[in-house]
Each structure stands twice: as structure tokens, then as C-alpha cells.
Image: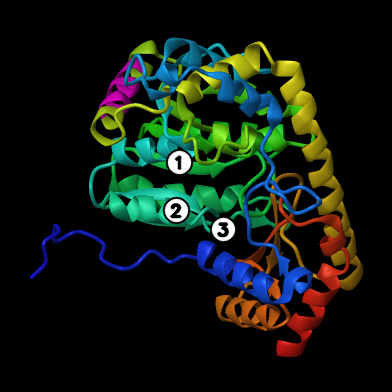
Amino acid sequence: MTFVRKSADLSPIKDTVFAVAALAAKDKQENGDLVIDATIGSLFSEDGSFVVFHSVFDHYDEIDHSVKGAYASSFRGNPPFRKAVYQWATQGADLSLAHSVIATPGGSGAVSCGFMSFLEPGETIIIPEIGWESYDLMARQNNLKTRTYQLFQEDRLNLESIRQAVLAVQPEQERIVLVINDPCHNPTGYSMTCEEWSELVEFLNGVSQTNPVILINDIAYIDYSYNLKHSREYLNCFNGFSDQVLAVIAFSCSKSFTCYGLRCGAAVILAQQETAVAETASVFEKVARTTWSNIPNAGMQNFTWVVTENRNAYLAEKQRYIDLLKQRSDLFITEARACGLPLYPYKEGFFVTIRVEDNDRVERIQKALMERHIYTVIVNKGIRIAVCSLPLRKTKGLAAVIRSVMDEID
């Protein structure tokens, strides 16, 4: 006998991050600075402290308690916030598409809206083979199946694998839903070129002649691009969508504004036809009402103030950490190349991932590293190194140590 629905997934969540992070924390208590903790997917400074932007939180602390305690003005989110999100998420692009914005609890809420809204139970959503593990969990929670595509063909996007995945699903259901985590892919740090985006849009337009296509573009890490000025230019490719292609951009305040626990984000809906956008927004609003109701009022107000009134101070503060991220990733990648440590193609972002095709071998490597007080995160076909939280002094020499451990267990 069970008290939950028969279709419920009763398997425990496979925790690949917090469990290992807890082991690292325990080891630090016993062995202090000897421990190398490359698990934490948040920004940390060189002295090991958690980074919180003063340009964001000094003003948040001044917001009146009545504002912090109040409901938002709408299930869709406060209008000034929704306007500011659209302008922020698409800055530098010249979009001619109809659009709407629905406030969500972080970028995960926006992604979840898509998983809940477009497909029927038992249908298939297409996700990257290497990616955020919650995509698969969201699918299972919504009684969806998944089909994965290989992310890379040598050092570029494997568009052929995406094509094969879409064509396999196409005869089986009415709509196609494809997840692309870009730019600053989690966990590899890859960013697609505008040429790759153009090829993808052209392919999706072809598919849309028989099946409506929904593209979920997860941009959680976009604001740590090493070329911020051009980070949104790829969105111009979306202007070429056919009438039967719709995009949902999943925007997160968590990483961009170091407010992971405040749970602010948004789904930016884009399509050629206003009716398609309005229909999707209506469904997303009902998802909001029946799951989280509304997101933090003060969080929305603070975001709006930061990106309008305090924009320059915020950008300057964040840039210091983008520069630090680049120093860390450059150091790790240079040393990885020198010692022959295989990596997935990295361009920018919080994480670098070591290429390990055999998942059984991945677990053996992680165990051997932990015996040497080095803590990493297992991903499908790889080992994630969180350069976002790893100080330079601990980044230096790490690639060579990992290479030697891998050689020992082979």
C-alpha cells in the first residue's frame, strides 16, 4: 500500500552535490586548508568567503519590512520587474518578436513551467546528455520521458545528435520540446556561436512545418560571460523563428545577483505571434498560482532598482568576479593541457568539466580524489570542477594531481 499516486517516482533524489559538499565540509573541520573543495556552485572570494554583492544587498537591507512581507501585485509578477527582466535578459539584441514575462522562483521555476505546460504525460522532452541533473528529475515528476542528445562533436555543438533526437521523437507526439542550456553551459562552460544558433534555428523551423517546436533556453549563467557586451547577440537569431516555433528563456537572478536563496527569476516567452505568447503566458500564470502563488515582492523590487538605479555599480562589482573566474579557469585549463587532462570544451562560466566517458570510472576517480582530500562533483560522463568557488592557490597544480590520480586507477 502507498499513500501517493501510483505513477509517483518513489526513488530517492540522487544527490551528487550536497552530499559530497557535506563530506568536504567535515574534512575541512579535521584537516583545514589541506582540503580542496571544488564542489560549491556559488561564487567564493580568494579568502574562501561566500560572495554577496554589496551593490545588490545594501539596498535590499533598506527596503521597508512592509514591502518585504507583502504579496506581489500579480501572480505574473510585479509589472516593473517583468519589464526590467525583459530589458535585462535581451539587452544588446534587437528582437522583433512578441513577448511576455512570468515571474518564477529562480530560473528553475521557469524551466519547470516549461516541463509542466507543453507536453502530455508519457511524452518525451529532449535534454542534453551532459547537463543539470534536475532536468531529468523535472521530467520524471511530470510523468515525462527524456531523450538525450550528445552535446559535442569534437569541440563544437553536436547539431547532428540534436537532429537525430528530434527526428526520433517527432513521429510519436504533436509537439517537440528541446532544452538548450546556453551560454555558459552547466557543467562544461561551453557557449554556442551565433553560427551554431543560426543552424539550430534553421533546423527547428524545418521541424515546425509538421510539429510545433518549443525551445527552452536556460540562461542561468549568462551574466558571467567573458564577453558580456556580446552575450545576448545570439538572440537575434530568434527573429528568424517560423510561426510554429516558440522560445522560453529561463532567467535566474540567483547567480547573476548572488541571491541564490531569494528565489527570483522569470520565464521570458518569445514567438512571432502574439496569440501564441498570450496562450503560453496564461498557462504559465496558472502554474504560478497553483504551485508558488507569487515570488518575493522585495526581491523583485530590489532587482528592478539594481538594474536601473544602481546598474553601473553593480556591473563594476560583478566584473571583478568575472575577471577572477577567468583567471581561475585560464589557470586550470592551461595546466590541464600541459599534463594531458582531457576536458570538455570550455569558453566561460562557473564550471570546467573533465571528460570521462565511462561513468563507472568516474566514480572510482572521485573516490580516489576524496582520499587525497580533493572533492569534486560527478556529472554524466565527467567530473565537474567549480572554479567559481576555488581560489587560485588551490587551483594551481590541481589538474596535474587529478591527471596522476586518473593514471593510477587505470
Q: Closer to the observer: label 2 or label 3?
A: 2
Residue that mark 1 sits on: 108
Q: Looking at the rendering, which quadrant does residue 152 occupy?
A: bottom right
- Mark closest to the chain's N terminus, 3 or 1: 1
**Amino acid on which disc 2 is placed:** Ser
Find the magenta span and give its range.
278-286
Which quarter of the figure is the C terminus placed in?
bottom right
**Amino acid on which disc 3 is placed:** Ile
Residue that mark 2 sits on: 134
**Amino acid on which disc 1 is placed:** Ser
* 285 sits to left or right of 378: left
Q: Residue at x 35, y 42 (%)?
A: 115
In terms of secondary structure, where does tag 1 sit?
helix
Task: State the image coordinates of residue 226 (x, y, percent, origin top left).
Answer: 79, 37
Say if mark 1 contacts mark 2, CB within 8 Å: yes
Q: Residues within 10 Å of mark 1 (few under 14, many from 20)?
A: many
Q: CA distance from mark 2 to mark 3?
A: 12 Å
User: Which labelled disc corresponds to residue 130?
Assistant: 3
